[in-house]
Image (cartoon, grey):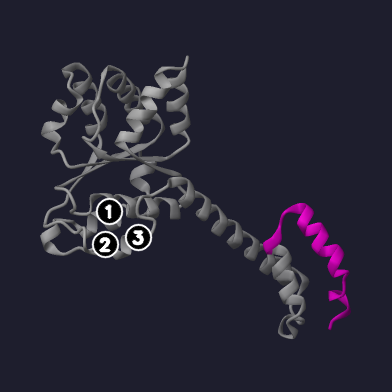
């Protein structure tokens, strides 16, 4: 072994631990034990170890984003979407959404279709794609969101805090729009959330209800107009067709 590569391994590992650079540490250790790398320059060692550290950090960050997102279908990925003609999906449209530019532009998305056609699965796949390009996503079912609104209403500034909590996410996926009853608190809270998302991020809604029936769900013409105007003014529409896929992969 080249004399310049001799160092106190325990001290090196201790320093790396304090600096919290485990990827750098493991890469240098592997290089040190690999005779094929002994002829590399010190700078080549450093760059190899730094790249390994960056890769490890990126992998850990992705795991955190996917865990925090709480997708219903953790396994869903765009590459496994079934683009059979009967489903009505445009492959070019979905593939163009994979890079997350629509989210960076603060566009919204709505996925409609009958029960069981795969709306939630496709939404999870698009959310997963967003996580993989460094964006933060939160998946929440509408009944739970409405419960959160009601709980927030019982606390001073609770709604404001809830809206601010959601602001840290680039994409908010609201699954099953149309389930759960909207009351006065829910309507006001939803309008505040949609209003805030115009400035801070995107919303993806999945719904069994066609858009023409959303006003009936909101059950108040003033709030319905306000919510629909804000959400639908800059939206990507995806309509899924075909039979139920409850027993299928997607």
SS assignment at label 2: loop
Q: Earlier in the sequence, mark 2 or mark 1?
A: 2
Q: Which residues are magenta?
A: 1-23
Q: Which mark is residue 77?
A: 3
User: Is residue 224 part of the magenta span, yes or no?
Assistant: no
Residue contact at pointers 2 and 1, CB within 8 angstroms? yes
User: Is residue 18 part of the magenta span, yes or no?
Assistant: yes
Visible residue check, residue 196:
no
Residue located 84% across and 75% down the image: 5
Q: Nearer the viewer, residue 207 or 180?
A: 180
Residue located 73% across and 76% down the image: 31
- The prevailing secondary structure element of the residues shown in magenta is helix
Count residues near mark 1 (Cα–Cα under 10 Å), then give few for <14, some for 14-19, many for 20+: many
Tell me the quadrant of the picture where the C terminus can be found. bottom left
Q: Is residue 176 left or right of residue 88?
A: right
Residue contact at pointers 1 and 3, CB within 8 angstroms? no
Count residues near mark 2 (Cα–Cα under 10 Å), then give few for <14, some for 14-19, many for 20+: some
Q: Residue furthest top?
A: 156
Q: Is residue 153 left or right of residue 96?
A: right
C-alpha separation, residue under disc 3 versus residue under disc 2: 7 Å
Residue 183 x, y percent position in the rendering: 26, 20
Q: Which mark is residue 81?
A: 2
Q: Nearer the viewer, residue 118 or 20?
A: 118
Q: Is residue 60 left or right of residue 73?
A: right
Q: Which mark is residue 203?
A: none
């Amino acid at each position: 072994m080249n004399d310049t590569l001799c160092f106190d391994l325990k001290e090196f590992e201790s320093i790396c631990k304090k600096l919290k650079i485990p990827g750098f540490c493991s890469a240098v250790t592997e290089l040190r034990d690999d005779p094929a790398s002994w002829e590399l320059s010190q700078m080549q060692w450093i760059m190899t170890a730094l790249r390994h550290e960056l890769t490890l950090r990126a992998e850990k960050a992705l795991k955190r984003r996917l865990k925090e997102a709480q997708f219903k279908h953790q396994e869903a990925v765009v590459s496994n979407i079934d683009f059979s003609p009967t489903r009505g999906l445009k492959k070019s449209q979905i593939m163009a959404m994979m890079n997350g530019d629509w989210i960076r532009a603060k566009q919204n998305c709505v996925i409609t279709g009958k029960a069981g056609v795969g709306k939630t699965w496709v939404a999870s796949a698009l959310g997963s794609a967003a996580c993989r390009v460094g964006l933060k996503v939160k998946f929440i079912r509408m009944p739970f969101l409405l419960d959160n609104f009601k709980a927030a209403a019982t606390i001073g500034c609770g709604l404001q805090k809830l809206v601010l909590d959601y602001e840290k996410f680039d994409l908010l996926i609201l699954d099953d729009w149309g389930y759960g009853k909207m009351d006065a608190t829910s309507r006001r809270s939803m309008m505040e959330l949609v209003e805030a998302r115009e400035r801070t991020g995107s919303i993806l809604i999945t719904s069994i209800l066609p858009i023409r029936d959303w006003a009936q769900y909101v059950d108040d013409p003033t709030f319905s107009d306000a919510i629909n105007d804000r959400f639908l003014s800059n939206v990507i529409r995806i309509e899924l067709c075909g039979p139920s896929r409850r027993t299928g992969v997607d």
